[in-house]
Amino acid sequence: MFQKMVPSDGALKITDISVKEECKARPPGLNTVNLLKVASSALGIGPQTAMHMAERLYIQGYISYPRTESTAYPASFDFRSVLSTLAHNPLWSNNVRTLMDAGFVKPRQGHDVGDHPPITPMRLAPEEALETDAWRLYQYICQHFIGTVSHDCIYTRTAVEFASGGEIFRCVGHRVTSKGFTSIMPWLAVGENNLPTFKKGDTINIHKVDIYEGSTTAPDYLSESELISLMEKNGIGTDASIPVHINNISERNYVQVNSGRRLVPTALGTTLIRGYQCIDADLCLPDIRSFIEQQITLIAKGKADHLQVIQHSLQQFMRKYSYFVKKIENMDTLFEAQFSPLADSGRLLSKCGKCGRYMKYISTQPMRMYCVTCEEVYYLPQNGSIKLYKEIICPLDGFELLLFSMVGPDAKSFPLCPCCYNSPPFEGIDKLFGALKLDDTGKVGKGAGMPCFLCPHPTCKQSMITQGVCACPECSGTLILDPVSAPKWRLLCNTCNCVVLLPHAAHRITTTDKKCPTCESTIIEVDFNKKATPLEDGATLHGGCILCDELLHSLVEMKHGKSFFMR
């Protein structure tokens, strides 16, 4: 509709024209971090290699000290002397002589951290005296210095606004009037796009109206240059240690450097991080390292006592280490699922509530679910069978429910959510059932877990609130209607082994939201089979309390318990 409306006027009308002179500022002095970013993104040289090359150039006397965080030159710096040295190289001699004749400008006001001046060329290096990559790095350092003392790039920005059929269109053009520093650093030049001369009120014939359809794309892997920027922003490492960190994760096979110097995480690196997140998520965040860097800065400024900082840091990491060792089985489980044949032998069973992908059911002991996408492991009750439960979704976390069945004719069976079972979302679930837990020796035992029959969710059709019928006569638990026991309907205690058999002549038994006025048990509704109904006149539907209703109470049978009475 909009496509047809645009050419309805027959022509575009120019409604507004704005012309503005703008400038692109020259770069500040070159520090280590910016040198490493350019070396990786523009020259294709890794940070560690670039740092070694810069140190060799410094030892040979070609550049100043390459480890610096400052981008501001001291007030007494002799820029003319450096330019005079560079004027003898034919690659940039014309630019340098023009600056010396017409007058150069001082670099932009950068940041001075009080360590060393920005990286600067100190004497002329012949190209044949250096290796190819070393020469390219030196050439960039020289061009950057010349750019810092050159004028800003000046250009005219023209914005034209058109209207037709109720739609507004805009077009922007750039015209460079003074190249400034971009003449020596052409990769930073402003892209020129000269527009024809327009006047407000002019009309332009419409040649064609197209509809463009596109879609968003996922972000690409981080490049080394982007990672260096993020490390600097989050206070991870210093100008000296940043290239070492990046080199370490590459050598340890946590990442692989692909084309474009992009860092692709390996299965080893991803599993390691997921393990840290499962045990102590703080270990994956830059906050700890950033805090230590801040404390070191305060020590240097005399605002913090170095002994107290050391003592606090040691105590913090000792506690984290002790906690990590206690929970190391979580890391082992992830590595086993990722790198052992167990992950391959598992079969797809139910959907993960976090990513929506199917999780694998690993039936070998200990039984568990494993999400390949999220790299999460969810333990299951042991010594039984697991299957999908009617594709019902847990209302708390979106996981598909599973049905666990014990072995034996009178054994229990109950639904459970893998996520709730491993991480009970409600406080006060003190008595929990049969989840797997590894003790300090790494042996399998029983510990915390929350199946649906212990869940206090007020509206879920599988929870203890909606399926619970009455108090268990043998313990402090609750008798729950077994929803999959048809045609041999029964109640199961969610704590002990008490079982109550319900009328076998029933076609369907369900709980209701009504309570017995006498004992406050849940009223159940029984739909008897027509041929075996105990009701008069052949009626089949009957509702009542199994404790107070004489008919229902006479039809129930206690099993694995002493007695059945109102409590």
Image (cartoon, rainbow, N blue to C red):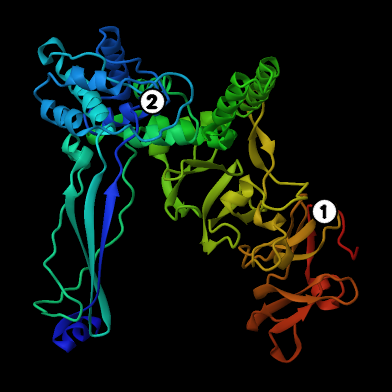
Q: Which residue is mark 2?
A: 73
Residue 210 image point, x, y percent? 16, 74
Tell me the residue at 28%/53% (across/down). Answer: 22
Q: CA distance from mark 1 to mark 2?
A: 88 Å
Q: Nearer the viewer, residue 224 or 318?
A: 224
Quarter of the image for residue 466 reads bottom right
User: In the image, what residue type sits under mark 2?
Assistant: Tyr
Give the number of marks: 2
The answer to whether residue 429 shows anywhere in this view is: yes
On the image, the x and y values in percent for residue 64 come to 32, 15
For marks 1 and 2 on the same chain, the one whose residue lies earlier in the sequence: 2
**Where does label 1 land, which residue?**
561
Q: Secondary structure at mark 2?
A: loop
Q: Are marks 1 and 2 in contact (CB under 8 Å)?
A: no
Camera-side mark, 1 or 2: 2
Q: What is the quadrant of the N terminus in the image?
A: bottom left
What amino acid is labelled 1 in the image? Gly
Identity of the residue drawn at 8% across and 77% down: 207
Which residue is located at x 26 percent, y 80 percent? 167
Residue 480: percent from left, percent from top: 73, 61
Q: Dividing the image into 4 quarters, which one contains the C terminus?
A: bottom right
Question: Relative to 176, is 457 above or below?
Answer: below
Horizontal side, residue 115 vs residue 514: left or right: left
- Judge whether residue 133 can be spotted in this image: no
